[in-house]
Every structure is written in C-alpha cells, then in structure tokens.
Image: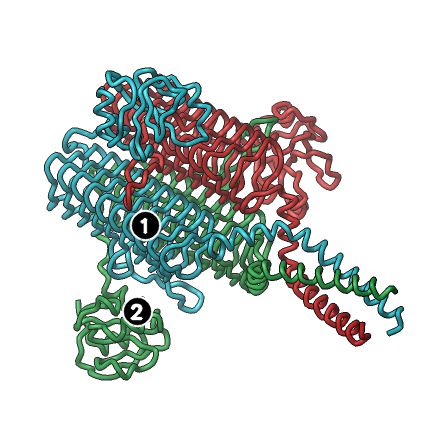
Chain colours: A cyan, B green, C red
Amino acid sequence: MEIPITKAAEMVGGECVGDEKFVVTGINSLDQAGPREISFFSDHRYGESLKNTKAGALLVSKINAQFTGPQVLTAHVALAYAKLAAFFAVPPTRYPGVSSDAFISGDCRLGEDVSISPMVYVGKGCEIGDGATLFPGVVLDQGVKIGTRTLLYPNVTVLRGCVIGNDVIVHAGTTIGSDGFGFVRDGTSSVKVPQTGIVQIDDHVEIGANNCIDRAAFGKTWIKEGVKTDNLVQIAHNVVIGEHSIIVALTGISGSSRLGRGVLIGGQVGVNDHIEIGDGVMVGPQSGVAKSIPSGGIFSGTPAIPHRAYLQNTALVAKLPQFKERLRGLEKKVRELEDRLEKNGD
Amino acid sequence: MEIPITKAAEMVGGECVGDEKFVVTGINSLDQAGPREISFFSDHRYGESLKNTKAGALLVSKINAQFTGPQVLTAHVALAYAKLAAFFAVPPTRYPGVSSDAFISGDCRLGEDVSISPMVYVGKGCEIGDGATLFPGVVLDQGVKIGTRTLLYPNVTVLRGCVIGNDVIVHAGTTIGSDGFGFVRDGTSSVKVPQTGIVQIDDHVEIGANNCIDRAAFGKTWIKEGVKTDNLVQIAHNVVIGEHSIIVALTGISGSSRLGRGVLIGGQVGVNDHIEIGDGVMVGPQSGVAKSIPSGGIFSGTPAIPHRAYLQNTALVAKLPQFKERLRGLEKKVRELEDRLEKNGD
Amino acid sequence: MEIPITKAAEMVGGECVGDEKFVVTGINSLDQAGPREISFFSDHRYGESLKNTKAGALLVSKINAQFTGPQVLTAHVALAYAKLAAFFAVPPTRYPGVSSDAFISGDCRLGEDVSISPMVYVGKGCEIGDGATLFPGVVLDQGVKIGTRTLLYPNVTVLRGCVIGNDVIVHAGTTIGSDGFGFVRDGTSSVKVPQTGIVQIDDHVEIGANNCIDRAAFGKTWIKEGVKTDNLVQIAHNVVIGEHSIIVALTGISGSSRLGRGVLIGGQVGVNDHIEIGDGVMVGPQSGVAKSIPSGGIFSGTPAIPHRAYLQNTALVAKLPQFKERLRGLEKKVRELEDRLEKNGD
C-alpha cells in the first residue's frame, strides 16, 4: 500500500511542506522508520531519535529545520499518526466464514459475512451481527447478542443474555457476565444472592485482555459508548461507566458505582461501591476513591482528595524528618526561655 | 413460577402484613419491580426508589406506612431477598449429558447426571461427581477430582491432581493449580523450584472470574469450606484460607500465609508471605498486611494498623499544612520572645 | 526413583555427613517427609517442624546435632533443594504427538517431538520448535513462533506474529500480544492507535497465569532472557524487561518503560510509563514508581523513594498524634511565656 504525501496530508487535515512528489509506503516510529516511510514528532522526549531517524517524511506540529524530507504540518500530530497508522495497518486475519469445527447451537441468528473460527462455542438463541468476528476459544453462552463488526479475541467468555453493541473489540481472556459478588451473611456463612441481570456494552467500546465485567444483580451493568478499558480491569455488578471514559489496568470499580462521561481512571485505582464520579473527573494511579466526586477536577491518593492537596500532603510527609527536628528545636528553646525567665526570678 | 405471599413469608421466616391473597410472580429491585413482583427495602439510600416503586409487595424490617401493598416483615431483609431470589432465579442452562464434541480421556469416572459441554477437555484419571457441570472451554488436566453439583464456567483450567469439593462454583477464566512462584537465585539467574503439591478446594466455595490459585510447593494450597473470592484474586502456593472467609477483587495473598475463619479482606489488598491473620479479622481495601494479625479487629493502611489509628493518621496527614503553619508561627513567636528577653538585657 | 545420598550430595555440590548408605527416594518438606525422604532446613521459622520431622535425611547449611540421620552440608540449601526437587519431580504429562482433535492451519512448521493436545488452535504460518508442548485450549494466532521445549499451559493465547523463545513456560490463561492501550483523544472521543508491533519473549522466561503482555505500537515489547513473572501481571506496549528480572503478582508496568537486568519488583506495584529502572533495583510491594531510578538501591512507597526514607516517613506518620500533642503543648507554653513577659511589663 502506498499513497502520495499530499494524499496523506489531506487524510489528516494537514499541510504538506517540502517535496510533494514523495510517496509514503508506511508509518513507523522515528527509530524504526525507513526512507520510504513517514514518522512523527511532537514529544521532546524523542529529540535524540529525531536526530538519528531514517524516516523519509514527518508529521509535525511545527516545521523542523534540521529535517530535510517533506513534512506534514498538523495541529494534532498524535491524531494524525493514529489516522495514518489505521490506514496502513494490516487488519487481524479473520477465519473465512463459519468453521465446521465450531459448535453452533440451534436457534441462532448469524449475520452476513460473519467469521467464526474453529473451537468457538455459540449457545442457543445467540444473535451475531453482520461482519462480526469470533476467534478460537470464544464461548458465547445462551442468548448472547453480538453487534455488527464486533471482534472477540481468543478465549473470551460472554455469559447468558449479555448484549454487546456494534464495532466493539474485546481482547483475549476477558469474561463478560460472570456473577456479581453478592452474598448475605447468615450467621457465620454466606448465602449467595442470585445475579439475574446482564451486562450491556454499547457501540465502539474496547475492553482489554483478562478483564472481568460482572452481570447485574437486577437490571444491567452498563458500559456506555466509546469506553476503553486496559487489561485486568474489574467492573462489578450494576456499575455504569459513562460514554468515552477510560480505565487503566488493574483498576477495580465496586458494585453499583457510576462514572460519568469522559472520566479518566488511572491504573490500580479502587473505586468504592455505591458512589458517583462526575463527568470529566481524572483519578490518578493507585488512588482509592472512597466518596463521590462531582464533575471535573483531578483527584489522587487514598482516600482520594484533590490532586493539588495530595501533592502538598505527599511533599509534607517527606518533610516530616525536618518537622521532627524543628519540633525538638522549639521544645529546647522554649525550655531555655522558661529557664531564663525562672532565673530572672519573675 | 408464582407463589402466594403467605408462602413467600413462610420461606423467609417472616410475617405477612396486609393482603394475604397477593400472588408473587418474581422478585426485583424497587426501580424495576412490576405490580405482581415483590421488592425489598432496608437501605435508606434507596428511599427515593421506594417512593416511586411499582412493586406489588415488599420485604421490610419495619412496616412502611406509605406503601399500600402487602409487606413481609423479617428481621433480616437481605437474607430474605437472597432466599426468594434463589427460588425465582433461572438456573444456568446445562448441556444435556456428555457432548460427543468434548474430549474425555481414558480412565475417567463420570458420575450420574454430569453435564459436559462441547469443547471441554478431561484428562486421564479424572473423577467428576454426580450432577457436576463443565461449560465449554473447561480444561481438566490429569487426575483432577470435581465434586457433586460443582459448576465450572467457561475457560476454567484445573491442573494436575487438584481436588475440588461439592457445590463449588468457579467462574470463567480462572486458573487452579498453576505452579507456585518459587525460584532460587543462583548467581544472577533464577532456578525453578518444582511445585509438586496441589490445590484443594472444599465444599460450598465460590471462586470469582480470572482468579489464579497456585499449587503448593509441597502438600496443598487449601481453600476451606464456604470461602468466596471475587474476581482477579491471586492466591499463592501453600496459602490456607479459613472457612467462610471472603476476599474482594484484585487482592493477592502471598505464599504460605494462613487466614483464619470468617476473615474479610477488602479489594486490592496485599498480604505478605508466611504470616497469619486470625479468625474474624477485617482488612480494609488497598491495605498491605505486613505482619501477622491476631483474631478479631479491623485493620487498614500500608503497613496495615488498627483501623482507628489508620483513620487518625490519615486525618493528621490531611492537617500537615496546618501543622506546618503552626510550626512556623511558633518559631516566629519563640524568636520574638528571645529577642524581647535579649532586649530586656538579661 | 531413588539415589544414594552420596549421589544426591554430589548433585548439589554438598558434603555427606553421617550414614553414606542411606538411599533417598524423594524430597519433601519437614512436616511431610517420610523416613526414606530427604528434607531441608535453613530457615529458623521452621525450627518446630525440624524437631518433629520424620525425614530420613536433611540438606543443611550447618550440621544439626539433634538430627540423627545423615545430613548433606551445602552453602546454599535452597538451591540444593531446588536441584534435588527438580530431579524427583514428575514432569507435566504431555499429549503424545499431534492430536487429530487439534486444529492446525496450513503452512505451519512443526518440529520433532511436538505435543499438541486436542482443542488447540494453530494459525497459518506458525512455527513450533522441537519438543514444544501445547496444552488444550491454547490458541496461536497466525505467524506465531514457539521455541524448542517451550511449554504453553491451557487456555494461553498468543496473538499474531509474536515470538517466544526456547525453554519458556507460560502458565494458564495468559494473553500474549493483545493490543497495547493506545488511544488519541479527538474532541470527546478516543481514536484507536493501531498496535502494529509484536511481543518477543526470550529463552528461559517463565510467565505466570492470567498475565497480559501487550504488543508494541511499533517494534516489540521485549521480555528478555530468564525473566520470571508471577500471576496477574500487566506489561504494557513497548516495555522492555531486562534479563533475569522478577515481577511479583498484580503488578503493572506502563507503556515504553524499561527495566534493567536483575530488577526485583514486588507485588501490586505500579510503574509509570516512559521511565527507566536500572539494573538490580528492588521495588517494595504496593509501591508506585513515578520517576526513573538509577541502578541498585531499594525503593518503596508511592511515589517510590529510597526504602530507608520510606520507613522513616512511615514511622513518623505513625507518630503524628504525638507531634500534634507536642505542638499543642508548645503553643500553650509559648502563650504562657508571652503572658509572663507581658505581666513583667516589658
């Protein structure tokens, strides 16, 4: 695949500066790009790589005088890179059609151009949308709905009645629709609370590898449009994750909590149950969100507090050895003052 | 399925107040219950939902004057709800019998009424108890024992020689019997210590999705009766978890540590290796338990300390900016006092 | 299997003291060893077990006067134990040859003595080295390379183009080669950045159960020789883990970060993106490594600081209640001093 650089510039809404005859055969990092590939520069941490790059062309936010090849000027280099990379990327290879080595139960509805690999299990009454792809080892329990063009990587499990929208990607090893963790104490033992709801995942969601998304006790656990989760994320029963929110790896969201739109949760964060996190809130890594947070703002620490206060507290903890010395010094001086006053005989 | 409300009251050991002719067709949350369903109220956080509910009947711990339908009075609403919900819940659909698309090795003993789905692998010499259910993608390595009525969800792996009791539930994607993390340093590299033990899981245990329970170096890693683990829990080699203990998501228990009976471990907790946590201890979320804890008591923080002290320390850290100001103020005053004494010429 | 104790001593480079005619039939822990087995003692925590052991022989670092059986004296007991245990350990049972119930795509190269279980999927163009073992439920996407004697446990997924070296062990449920978590914000939604690189795992690596190792955006995520990871570890795109490093359970290493040789990372640690951790660094459990760390040194806490400072700060936080009292006491005394000076009429 190759395109003229002018076409590449057009695709990303940028302006081509330099040799307009240059033909782009691919996109790559500064370190790895060859003379017929385009690369990108916007992060000063890669200054050294820029000096040594063999890339033939560059996506830049400001023309670079040292670089002699053609440059595509664009306000948002990272977005331009994502778009061009998507153009050049080889899509995952899909099994052609429905394998006779897959197990498809009766009463299923398979759309057009569905790809079902060997070693896939599809339970009774499932509906699989046009262009959907199921890799080997995928297990759909009964009554599961998979939207159009949705892609389930190997060894993904989707349990009874869960509904996954269109253009969703679920990475390998993820479990969707396991029972919520609901028990009631009866004396010293635990009685299971049946989890009768489902998980609903809306369009354009991407779920990382080895995630667990539990079904609701009643109703649904709901992952709204455009949400992206990293690997090893835990989402408990009846949680609602608002549109376009992002959750980084090893984070756990406890039962019935609700995240608003565009929330960003760092890695290894814990969110308490039955709380609300407002639209656009950012939570720093390893934080523990104990209470609801209104919209906006950056929070960090356990318990999570406004990030500025967290930084201040952290800095002050680091100064505790000095505080201790200052306390000791003050105590000494005060004793001396007392002694002096004493001697003064007052 | 439907039962008279008097029968429902009897099932939960409660007392029916109001229309005894009411017939219950199901149980649901306040928000979702219909006029022929029963709901439940005991948590003041749901007061608003109570006002708007369309439920026909209620489980309550105290008669609610606003609600006009029949009410079942019971001391323990949550337990009553769990019992009724279990009665109405549709059980997971089991594959009828042993699928010819499963792979069953020689020398296995399969009990009565076993359900083995397509795409299940059962290794040599396995024993599977009456009424057990293996969902698609389950892999039993050789010599595994599965108790009666035990349920393994899709893509669960149980490795060589591990023993799972009766009425156990293991959620999807969980690994039981992986090698314990045992290495000995030899100069700069690591020499593997063979893990020759097993995992034993006793009756009525429920293991969440994508858990890892490692086999013992020698002997067994032991999950005792009635234990419940949430998703993404790590249990290392030779750990013993006491009866009816509960472990919330993303927690890790390090090698050879022992938890007593009825221990409650919050989410994202780390427990050090070779320590003991006594009966009935509660450990707050995100704590790091560095040392053994005697029976009883609530612990929090890293390193974990009694919860009250943890709260106090956390509150004091939040006051460090004030402490800093007070220290500065004191230093200024002491300097002034010194100056005044100096001037006084003493 | 049995060997004379003199042979056992020779195997571990130790010296036999006592009855040289003793024949060793196995190795076991002090608690579980029988009179024909050898055990080991070097950890004072097991003193009580030593008193009660029925073991017939012992590996020791110093001759134990109480123990009457033969003893093998060796400087490094744990290593000696690992070596003898490896000798006696029963290796995992391999499926004999390539199962006709596995799905092997065209254009694959299978080495000599390969073991491929039923319910394994091997995609187009894969290469599988001599003596490699694939357990049931393993899925190799297209173009994957597996080295000689490498062992993949059940339900492991290796995605397109990833390369795994020789003598590697990957435990059950692990995903290798899932897409890195790369998105660019475009207004309020997220645009996926194609992840076009691979994962490369070098020789003698052991990866725990339910790990996630993401493929690189470009180039490779690289796990170098002899690395060992525990369960539920997350390794993001473009990370490099240096030779013989060790990563304990539930830890996450963020994108593009590089760990040196022989780094030890405790459990539940988070490592920030784009940082470097030098050779031989140790990071304590539950730490958050925010910035690069030069070679050597032990770090703890969030943000991670030198371990000694961390211990000091933690101890001082525990003393905050005392500090508060001391501050209050000082304020009172200073007020009194001021009053006295005031009264003195100066």
The circle drawn on residue B81 is 2
Residue B82 lies, in percent from the top left, at 31, 66
Front-most of residues B55 and B279: B55
Q: Residue at x 29, y 37 (%)?
A: C192
Task: Say which chain tag 2 marks.
Answer: B
Residue C137 seen anywhere in this rendered image of the structure: no
Position of the C terminus of chain C by quadrant: bottom right
Residue B330 lies, in percent from the top left, at 70, 62
Residue B28 seen anywhere in this rendered image of the structure: yes
Tell me the distance, in whole angstroms, between the alpha carbons under discs 1 and 2.
Answer: 35 Å
Circle 1: is it few (<14), some (14-19), or many (20+) Cα within 10 Å?
many
Q: What kind of element bears circle 1?
A: loop
- Pointers 1 and 2 in contact (CB under 8 A)? no
Task: Say which chain tag 1 marks.
Answer: A
| Amino acid type of the residue tagged 1 in the rendering | Gly
Circle 2: is it few (<14), some (14-19), or many (20+) Cα within 10 Å?
many
Front-most of residues A26 and A94: A26
Report the residue marked by disc 1.
A262
Front-most of residues B186 and B311: B311
Q: In this view, does C62 lie above or below A269?
A: above
Q: What kind of element bears circle 2?
A: helix
Q: Residue at x 22, y 30 (%)?
A: A11
**Left or right: residue B223 compared with residue A40:** right
Q: Residue at x 31, y 82 (%)?
A: B63
Front-most of residues C163 and C58: C163
Q: Which residue is drawn at 58% across and 48% down?
A: B274
Q: Is residue B207 above or below residue A90?
A: below
Question: Which quadrant would residue C343 be assigned to in this image?
Answer: bottom right
